[in-house]
Amino acid sequence: MTYARFLGLFVVLPILIQLWRYRRTFSAKTLAPMGMLLIVVYAATSPWDNLAVKWGLWGFDAERIWGIKLGYLPLEEYLFFGLQTLLVGLWARARLARALESPSVETKAPATPSDRALSPSEVSS
């Protein structure tokens, strides 16, 4: 399986499903923080991933990538960073929206004898 096919099947498809499923939840305003998250992910992941490939810790089969490289990494690896972040971020955002819109029902349990205040006659012996 090529890297692009893997991304399409296991990352892009779930993103599209989430976008369709939670389309009423997502808006430009609610997804704006995702941009900052992507900047952090690329800034943190790109250097060490490039070094790992440069030092031979892992590599990419030339027959399974498009052949476009930025530094030591194929384009698909950079797409993976961003798409995986979007996949998890969209899921977390949808879950947060559902949690915030759920009515918070605070039911107080009936008072037990240990919950009530003591009367003066019970305190003095």
Image: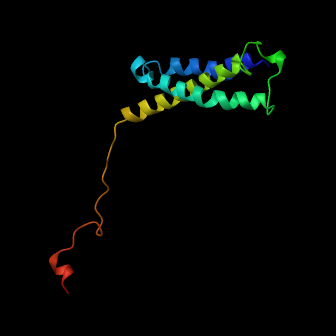
Rendering quarter of residue 62: top right
| Farthest residue, direction bottom | 125
Establish if 55 lies above or below 71: below
Count of marks overlaid on the render: 0
- Image location of residue 7, percent across then percent down: 69, 20
Residue for point 66% across, 29% down:
47
Q: In this view, does 14 lie to the left or right of 54?
A: left
Left-right relation of 64 to 16 = right
Please give the name of the residue rendered at 28% of the width and 66% of the height, measured from the top-left corner: 115
Q: How is the image coloured?
A: rainbow
Image quadrant where residue 48 sits = top right
Residue 89 is situated, as x and y percent measured from the top left of the image, at 52, 28
Residue 125 as seen in the image, left or right of residue 51: left
Camera sees residue 44: yes
Give residue 60's position: percent from left, percent from top. 80, 23
Residue 104 position by quadrant = top left
Q: In the rendered image, is residue 9 in sight?
A: no
Q: Quadrant of the N terminus?
A: top right
Where 44 sits versus 124, above or below?
Answer: above
User: In the image, residue 88 lies at what x, y percent?
Assistant: 56, 29
Pick the front one: 66 or 119: 66
- Which quadrant would the C terminus be assigned to in this image? bottom left
Residue 67 located left or right of residue 23: right
Task: Name the one closer to the observer, 72 or 16.
Answer: 72
Instruction: Identify the residue shown where x is 76% and y is 12%.
Output: 66
